[in-house]
Image: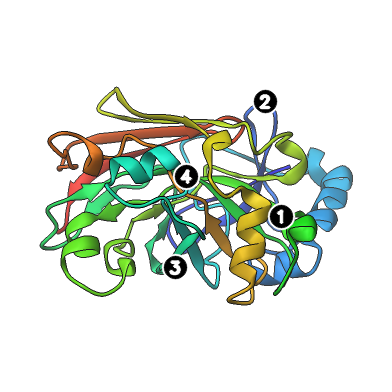
């Protein structure tokens, strides 16, 4: 299934995206896509509900806003420098272990919402990434069993303000957590929708020009390895997001570096996970 959420900010309703592009309102199922939904085997229960009631579920206009496909998770864990060529363009060493950091959950927005340049920002950058969404609570899971705890995958743009991240001291979280810096979706594809998460093409454009082209096959640490690694240091809860890193082509790595400004349009996509679009605006 492809899980979606639709409606105005804070009023999103759960839905399902059909193969023909039809959006169904599944509010009648009785649960948003939050921690309790995933923990309670909600995907299986929703699939059964769809068999019985999907034909009568309300259709939703394409004009209705796309929300993030999961209700605010307990945490968004990001992985840095997980593509060898991205580490090289950033002038950083190839990591021997995954580089992990947090992105504030208040940064989460819909896939086509505005990207808002924060106050005092000068170096807002883009990063197309594959996001993992957890289905079950887990800690200390082995690589071999890691996928048993995964609900599915989504498209994520891990926006950064490089001056906050790299020039203001402290941890990277400062440059990753501004409001609107985590557009997720358009949908959460459950595991059976993605046949090979290790071979997904990924791309990003700025103002119609390609900036990033890559593949998840180039990740240094793959999906099972990342789930296992993160679970070594913290309990992963149902609905939590792990963003797995970006291929080369970020603004920081260009010569000279190029960053986003108001009026720019960023478009991105991953095979099997749809596309998203963010227009850049100044903070008001």
Element type at marker 1? strand
Query: Distance between the Cα atoms at labels 4 and 3?
Result: 16 Å
Secondary structure found at label 2: loop
Q: Nearer the viewer, mark 4 or mark 1?
A: 4
Q: Quadrant of residue 59?
A: top right
Residue 62, how many percent across, how many down? Answer: 51, 34
Quadrant of the snapshot with the C terminus: bottom left
Residue 129's disc is 4
The span from disc 1 to disc 3 (Cα, nearest Å) is 19 Å
Residue 251 tag number? none
Q: Quadrant of the N terminus?
A: top right
* Residue named by callout 2: 20
Residue under circle 3?
A: 105
Dot 2: within a 10 Å radius of its alpha carbon, few (fewer than 14), some, or many (20 or more) residues? few
On the image, the x and y values in percent for residue 239 come to 63, 64
For mark 1, what is the residue?
151
């Amino acid at each position: 299934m492809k899980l979606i959420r639709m409606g105005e900010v804070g009023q999103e309703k759960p839905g399902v995206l059909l193969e023909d592009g039809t959006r169904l309102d599944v509010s009648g199922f009785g649960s948003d896509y939050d921690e309790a939904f995933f923990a309670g085997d909600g995907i299986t229960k929703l699939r059964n509900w769809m068999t019985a009631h999907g034909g009568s579920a309300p259709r939703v206009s394409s004009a209705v806003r796309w929300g993030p496909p999961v209700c605010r998770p307990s945490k968004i864990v990001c992985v840095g420098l997980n593509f060898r060529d991205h580490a090289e363009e950033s002038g950083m060493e190839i990591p021997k272990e995954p580089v992990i950091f947090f992105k504030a959950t208040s940064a989460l927005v819909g896939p086509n919402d505005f990207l808002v340049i924060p106050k005092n920002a000068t170096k807002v950058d883009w990063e197309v990434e594959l996001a993992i969404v957890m289905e079950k609570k887990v800690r200390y899971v082995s690589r071999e069993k890691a996928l048993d705890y995964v609900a599915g995958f989504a498209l994520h743009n891990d926006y950064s303000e490089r001056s906050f991240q790299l020039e203001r001291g402290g941890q990277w979280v400062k440059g990753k957590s501004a409001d609107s810096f985590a557009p997720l979706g358009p949908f959460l594809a459950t595991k059976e929708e993605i046949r090979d998460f290790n071979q997904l093409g990924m791309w990003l454009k700025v103002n119609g020009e390609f900036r990033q082209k890559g593949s998840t096959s180039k990740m240094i640490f793959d999906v099972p390895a990342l789930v296992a690694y993160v679970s070594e240091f913290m309990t992963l809860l149902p609905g939590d997001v792990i963003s797995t890193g970006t291929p080369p082509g970020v603004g920081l790595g260009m010569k000279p570096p190029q960053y986003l400004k108001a009026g720019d349009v960023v478009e991105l996509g991953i095979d099997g996970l749809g596309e998203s679009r963010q227009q850049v605006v100044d903070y008001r």
